[in-house]
Image (tube, grey):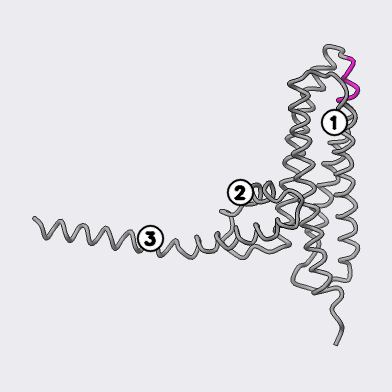
């Protein structure tokens, strides 16, 4: 009986070891992706938030995570935050409109700014896709300028949204939730812009400004 037990234990041990070794390259790749994210996020104003949001996507990567791809992810994170904020503020605006509350106009103006910001972020994502990271592009300055302009506008929209109702008594709970969502959106967008600026600077050095031989 004892030899059978030892054989079973040996078999299970070898099976576990095989599975661990098979998984190890993927685990190692994800660890490198996490380290890459932590390094890139140091260029942002809110590195902890940057790392937390972007690391959520690490499990999806089994190949090299590039600066270009990270920028694209950061923009998508910002867009998701904007859409989440939009959904909540829309519900608040509907409620205020139905009750004919005097603060409806302020919240509606805030919502208009968020809607415009979503357009700007969507434009930025589409423009970023046009940049070829592994090739020279004479159009890069144009693409980069568009992204930076749209993202700066999106940040201004968020700031305006906060300003239009910050001093109005909408209701403590709703006001606190809107402020938290808008602040989160502002930070995520700021981080995305910082990551793009870092990518753009490196791109110019290695592509656009590379001397011709």
Where does label 3 land, which residue? 19
Q: Position of residue 31 (x, y in %)?
A: 55, 60
Local SS, label 1: helix
- Image quarter in which the N terminus is found: bottom left
**Residue 154, how many percent across, how many down?**
86, 44
User: Which numbered disc covers residue 56?
Assistant: 2
Is residue 91 left or right of 150 when viewed as pictured?
left
Q: Nearer the viewer, residue 68 or 28?
A: 28
Gap between marks 1 and 3, in whole Å?
51 Å
Q: Is mark 2 in CB contact (under 8 Å) with mark 3?
A: no
Residue range in magenta is 102-107
Q: Residues within 10 Å of mark 1 (few under 14, many from 20)?
A: many
First in sequence, mark 2 or 3: give its number.
3
User: Which quadrant of the view contains residue 171?
Assistant: top right
**Is residue 143 rendered magenta in the image?**
no
- Residue at position x 18%, y 61% in the image: 7
Which residue is rendered at x = 74% and y = 56% of the image? 71
- Residue tagged 1: 111
Residue 106 among magenta residues? yes
């Amino acid at each position: 009986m004892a030899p059978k037990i030892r054989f079973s234990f040996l078999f299970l041990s070898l099976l576990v070891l095989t599975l661990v070794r098979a998984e190890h390259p993927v685990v190692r790749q994800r660890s490198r992706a996490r380290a890459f994210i932590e390094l890139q996020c140091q260029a942002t104003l809110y590195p902890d938030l940057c790392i937390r949001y972007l690391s959520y996507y690490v499990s999806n990567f089994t190949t090299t995570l590039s600066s270009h791809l990270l920028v694209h992810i950061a923009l998508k994170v910002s867009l998701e935050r904007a859409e989440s904020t939009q959904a909540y503020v829309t519900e608040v605006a509907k409620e205020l409109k139905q009750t004919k509350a005097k603060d409806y106009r302020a919240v509606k103006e805030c919502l208009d700014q968020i809607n415009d910001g979503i357009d700007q972020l969507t434009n930025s994502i589409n423009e970023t896709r046009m940049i070829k990271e592994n090739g020279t592009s004479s159009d890069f300055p144009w693409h980069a300028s568009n992204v930076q302009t749209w993202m700066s506008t999106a940040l201004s929209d968020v700031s305006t949204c906060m300003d239009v109702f910050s001093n109005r008594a909408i209701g403590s709970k709703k006001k606190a939730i809107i402020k938290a969502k808008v602040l989160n959106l502002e930070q995520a967008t700021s981080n995305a812009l910082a990551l793009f600026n870092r990518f753009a600077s490196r791109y110019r050095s290695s592509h656009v400004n590379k001397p011709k031989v």
